[in-house]
Amino acid sequence: MLFKVYYQETKIRNPKREETKSLYIEAENEVAARQLVEENTAYNIEYFQLLDGNHLQYEKENADFSLTEFK
């Protein structure tokens, strides 16, 4: 499954909509995706969005789409 993760780069400051960023991640489910992001970053996670069907196709064609892989 592919997820679009909305996040703030730091947990220290209050979240501001203008500073929200996103990344794309592949995981078995939302719990596994959240665990990957939390273990490998210091991001303040706002939302996980499952991408499939037309929405996934749109993201691939119109966004800066690249999967994030953690090592």
Image: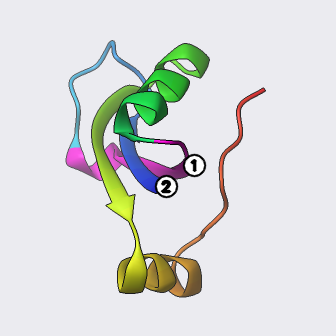
Snapshot quadrant of residue 29? top left
Colour scheme in the image?
rainbow
Q: Secondary structure at mark 1?
A: strand
28 is higher (above) or lower (below) than 22: above
Q: Position of residue 31 (x, y in %)?
A: 37, 30
Checking the image for residue 26, the label placed there is 1
Judge left or right: residue 68 versus residue 9. right
Identify the residue at horizontal 54%, vertical 42% (top origin). Answer: 27
Classify 10 Å Cα crowding around label 1: few (below 14), some (14-19), many (20 and above).
some
Residue ID for mark 2: 1
Q: How many callouts does the rendering have?
A: 2
Three-letter code for the amino acid on which mark 1 is drawn: Glu
Q: Secondary structure at mark 2?
A: loop
Q: CA distance from mark 2 to mark 1?
A: 6 Å
Q: Nearer the viewer, residue 7 or 19?
A: 7
Snapshot quadrant of residue 67? bottom right
Q: Position of residue 47 (x, y in %)?
A: 27, 43
Query: Among all residues in the image, which is located at the extreme right?
Result: 71
Judge left or right: residue 19 versus residue 3. left
Identify the residue at horizontal 28%, vertical 19% (top origin). Answer: 13
User: Do callouts 2 and 1 mark residues in contact (Cβ within 8 Å)?
Assistant: yes
57 is higher (above) or lower (below) than 19: below
Judge left or right: residue 22 versus residue 70. left
55 is higher (above) or lower (below) than 3: below
48 is higher (above) or lower (below) than 50: above
Q: Which residues are magenta?
A: 17-28
Three-letter code for the amino acid on which mark 2 is drawn: Met
